[in-house]
Amino acid sequence: MNWLLANPDRVRELTVEHLYLSIIPVVAGLIIALALGLVFGNRRRARNIITTAASAVFTIPSLALFVVLPSILGTQILDPVNVLVALSMYSAALLVRTVFDALDAVPAQVLSAAEAIGYSPARRRLLVDLPLAIAPLAAGLRVAAVTNVSLVSVGAVIGIGGLGQLFTSGYQRDYPDQILAGIIMILLLAFVLDRLIAVAGRVMTPWLHVSLKIVAPAGTEPATGNPASAASQSGGGK
Amino acid sequence: MITFESVSKTYPGGTQALENLDLDIATGSFTVLVGPSGCGKTTSMRMINRMATPTSGRVLVNGQDVAEIRPVSLRLGIGYVLQNGGLFPHRTVIDNIATVQRLLGLDKKAARAKAYEALERVGLNASLAKRFPAQLSGGQQQRVGVARALAADPPILLMDEPFSAVDPIVREELQQEVRRLQAEIKKTIVLVTHDIDEALLLGDKIAVMAPGGTLQQYATPHEILTRPANGFVGSMVSKDRGFRALSFSTLDEFSSTALPPRGADGRISMAAVAPGWMLDLDPEARTALWINEAGTTFPAATMVRRGDSVRSALDAVLASPVSAALLLDANDVPGAYITLEDLAPHLRPSPVAGA
């Protein structure tokens, strides 16, 4: 703990680096996974190929990917882009299955209703399927974000790893206090990101968090011919 | 006008869903497709908005083959009500209702204004507008479903078993509501149900279909009850068929007995029909009570008006403890009563118009 408290500037610098190395890939991965899911969700063959490819990507060791990517991308070995691309691939691989499952879970009756009242397929995907998939998507996103926070630290081995650098340097200098500081900060970061996504998911799905008690008074009775409810009707229309 | 021209549908594997259906649905009529499951009624209805495609034959809406109309624009011009309402769980009541208008390109404010009108038209209070569907009862959800279908004022309304998921009391309420609405808005409505009673209650015309997708009879409820085309139709309507047919003859010319004058205690003696019984009439409060010798009172709940159906008049007589139903005059005041003897001449099958 001493090291953590004694070096606030260094900790802040590494935390910011760690944060952007974790968040950018999750966002990129989510966009890729959503695009794949929305476009190919209904095509069985394409889906099988994508999920198989995703599993394959996820089995590649991260360190190997960090090292191999520069030769594929033409980047410097110490370029943070390598880490960003590698982690985006993992995030996309992790999320694409979630996206498929989340879209599958949207009730068929709702989709059929949307089609019957005149949604075009693309519009329906964006305005009906997607919002109704938010809750399971948020759950999957939390896993991806936390996974990413821990994976970033592996980048420290090639010199880009945010708080992970506290592990490498602490290990080299045989300085456990520094390693402990890294663990504490990474746990904290993972926890905060997890909560943020959970809260955002809740805020974006208000219909799942309303009181289901059907409160009778002002609405259950048909309003016809009742002056009191007719008055409240015109008021409610504003 | 919706026309089915020798429409057939065969599913891959050979299942026949619909066989050579010819049907003319008049503009402004309420048509009910009824039959057991597997009779192709839902498939037929879904062909109107291209949710299903015929294997052969054509479906025309106002003379135009629907196969030539883009599905999205066709559907935006046809209201659709589903079982359970088919509401969007993630949208509030008002935004559910505004959906079609939004799809048609109306801005949010204008679409919502229209939606509030539709909400009112189906008898729902505006205080429900901001709720989500999960916060409504089944009956309310169904009303919202109807409001959503009506909001854009489409000339055609398709209803897919709209009342089968609600309890019997709410169902009856909704059926009456739809009848009232139809009298008001005069849409071309096509409703699918497996419930023959619902069909008889709601339809101007009923198409009875049998498994395999064959049309058995296409006629008015009256004709279906009094002259079923074949054994299949007969067996569908067999329950209380004779009694229900009385719904279609109205009571215009008939005998009745004037109520005797009030006695000293203000009560009217009904000894002529039931010895010992009295009637306590309060025209001001519009209440009427039958009173027996022991002083027990029975409210006279159902009364008869000139022009009522023979069925409801008979029901009122049978429900009365003195076997007489009060007859309301033009001012809605009971001035006479009718008994079984008065109804007897009317208790015979009425001839089918034009037959």
Image (cartoon, helix red, strand yellow):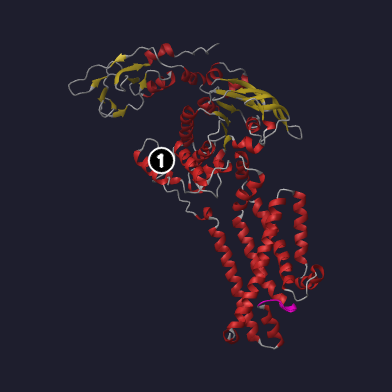
The answer to whether B333 appears left or right of A41 in the picture is left
Tell me what residue is drawn at x 58 percent, y 31 percent: B192
The residue nearer to you, when weighing A195 against A214, is A195
Tell me what residue is drawn at x 32 percent, y 18 percent: B337
Magenta residue span: A156-162
Occupied quadrant, residue B16: top right
Tell me what residue is drawn at x 64 percent, y 84 percent: A178
The answer to whether A181 appears left or right of B14 in the picture is left
Q: Quadrant of the N terminus of chain B?
A: top right
Occupied quadrant, residue B298: top left
Residue A2 x %, y %: 58, 87
Occupied quadrant, residue B275: top left
Residue A82 x %, y %: 75, 71
Q: Amino acid at mark 1?
A: Glu
- Per the image, is A157 magenta? yes
The residue nearer to you, when weighing B331 against B215, is B331
Furthest toward the left, the residue is B264
